[in-house]
């Protein structure tokens, strides 16, 4: 019986048809799954959830951009009463009642929120709390007897112009939960000659808000570092009235501590400029400069003024000592000085000179005052231990020499007012007899 052989061309055509049929079947099954996955990924990215394997382009040091699709770390929970909505915010609309709904909707570029079955709500520039109230009012018709809430799902991305005395002026992208300090950090930080006490926020029209960023950094005054809004512009003016603080200060991250000198210490890492604002006192200026370092001789500081010689200000007097533009605050290094305190004519710090004795330093300070004792002095070691000292005892760097008050002088101070009052009484009695 003859064998029927299929022609090569027909055989190839048959196999191609079978392969095409198989691919069509697979595509019919896989395509909906792939389409759904792509849709889900697109939706997750729009909602700021990132892909399943994690988000990219996160806001890292040196990366001066803020992606609205990134997960972000907030400093605290968003306050609906103070958070102002901006185009690009994603909001969660929740409705519970006869019909349960939950929708995540964006605020459009025109500032409107379009809610299906409810309508268009103009929410741009209003607080989240006010928008929540407007949504509840609008839902009374289509969703009667239902609980309605509006919450923030993802903050918007703002473009804020930063100008003035910053390292890299320009327009920078920040999240709508950012504060003024965040925008300045994106612009590379403040320049040395910037006035951090009068940072301007130009908000709509001619309105100008001024914030004291240094008070926020030194004392944590959160009101001086407000949150930014859509349309804000940040401007940093040049510093006009400044105080220079030099010497032993707490180091900033990455700074290298350098030894000071009994003479002028113009070391750049240990010299800081502090702008003045109003009636600033010495204690704030030193805090704003970072505070004294661990090697600071904690008896006090010198303040150099243009019209006077150096003024010694004990630590207890810092809160009452008013600063003036051009002042130079000299924070001393304890290992190069000897402190003479108590009842002397000129208490303060004196340069340490090897071989000098207690009496040398006491008389360098003008000697005992009218109320000071001529003996019975004491030395306070750097460890805090106090011991009696003779005039000829040697002194080490960082010690404190204490000259106490005369006991008889203290008694006289108590008796003198009483004696004066008694004498006045006797005089009055003799006068009117």
Image (tube, helix red, strand yellow):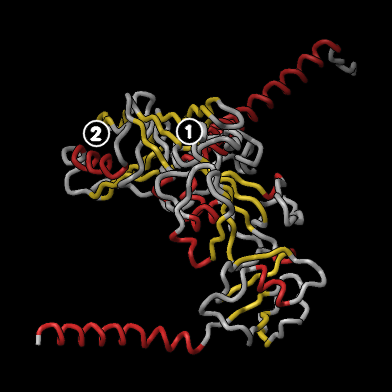
> Front-most of 48 and 305?
305
Name of the residue lying farthest toward the left: 433
In the image, residue 220 above or below residue 60: below
Asked where in the image residue 187 lies, by quadrant, the reply is: top right
Residue drawn where x is 46% and y is 42% of the image: 197
From the viewer's perspective, is 327 left or right of 93? right
Residue drawn where x is 57% and y is 37% of the image: 190
Circle 1 sits on which residue? 157
Horizontal and vertical percent for residue 282?
50, 55
Is residue 7 something that shows in the picture? yes
Tell me the element at label 2.
Answer: loop
Is residue 40 something that shows in the picture? no
Looking at the rendered structure, the number of numbered marks drawn on it comes to: 2
Query: How many residues crowd around disc 2 within 10 Å: few (fewer than 14), some, or many (20 or more)?
Result: some
Query: How many residues crowd around disc 1 within 10 Å: few (fewer than 14), some, or many (20 or more)?
Result: many
Q: Which numbered disc, 2 or 1, marks the residue closer to the eye?
A: 1
Residue drawn where x is 35% and y is 36% of the image: 85
Q: Which mark is residue 118?
A: 2
Q: Which mark is residue 298?
A: none
In the image, residue 301 above or below residue 128: below
From the viewer's perspective, is 177 left or right of 64? left
Task: State the separation of the CA atoms marked 2 and 1.
Answer: 26 Å
- Image quadrant in which the C terminus is located: bottom left
Horizontal and vertical percent for residue 220?
46, 54
- Going from the N terminus, do you reach mark 2 or mark 1 first? 2
Tell me the element at label 1.
Answer: strand
């Amino acid at each position: 019986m003859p064998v029927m052989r299929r022609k090569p061309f027909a055989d190839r055509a048959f196999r191609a048809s079978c392969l095409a049929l198989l691919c069509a079947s697979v595509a019919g099954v896989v395509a909906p799954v792939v389409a759904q996955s792509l849709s889900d990924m697109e939706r997750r990215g729009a909602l700021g959830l990132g892909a399943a394997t994690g988000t990219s382009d996160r806001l890292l040091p040196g990366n001066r951009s803020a992606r609205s699709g990134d997960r972000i770390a907030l400093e605290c929970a968003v306050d609906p009463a103070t958070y102002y909505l901006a185009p690009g915010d994603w909001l969660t609309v929740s409705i519970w009642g006869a019909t349960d709904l939950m929708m995540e909707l964006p605020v459009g570029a025109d500032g409107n929120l379009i809610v299906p079955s409810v309508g268009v709500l103009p929410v741009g520039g209003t607080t989240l709390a006010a928008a929540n109230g407007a949504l509840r009012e609008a839902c009374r018709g289509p969703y009667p007897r239902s609980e309605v809430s509006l919450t923030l799902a993802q903050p918007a991305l703002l473009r804020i112009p930063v100008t003035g005395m910053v390292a890299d002026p320009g327009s920078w992208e920040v999240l709508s939960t950012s504060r003024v300090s965040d925008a300045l950090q994106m612009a590379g930080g403040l320049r040395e000659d910037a006035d951090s006490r009068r940072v301007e926020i130009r908000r709509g029209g001619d309105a100008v808000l001024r914030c004291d960023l240094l008070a926020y950094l030194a004392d944590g005054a959160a009101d001086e570092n407000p949150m930014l809004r859509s349309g804000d512009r940040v401007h940093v003016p040049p510093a006009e009235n400044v105080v220079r603080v030099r010497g032993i200060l707490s180091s900033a991250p990455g700074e290298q501590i350098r030894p000071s000198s009994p003479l002028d210490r113009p070391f750049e890492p240990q010299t800081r400029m502090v702008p003045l604002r109003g009636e600033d006192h010495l204690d704030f200026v030193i805090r704003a400069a970072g505070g004294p370092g661990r090697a600071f001789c904690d008896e006090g500081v010198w303040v150099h003024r243009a019209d006077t010689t150096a003024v010694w200000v004990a630590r207890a007097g810092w809160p009452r000592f008013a600063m003036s533009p051009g002042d130079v605050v000299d924070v001393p290094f304890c290992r190069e000085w000897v402190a003479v305190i108590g009842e002397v004519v000129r208490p303060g710090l004196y340069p340490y000179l090897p071989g000098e004795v207690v009496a040398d330093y006491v008389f360098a300070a003008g000697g005992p005052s009218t109320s000071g004792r001529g003996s019975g002095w004491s030395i306070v070691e750097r460890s805090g231990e106090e011991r009696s000292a003779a005039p000829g005892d040697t002194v080490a760097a960082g010690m404190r020499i204490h000259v106490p008050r005369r006991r008889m002088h203290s008694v006289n101070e108590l008796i003198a007012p009483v004696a004066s009052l008694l004498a006045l009484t006797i005089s009055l009695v003799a006068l009117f007899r």
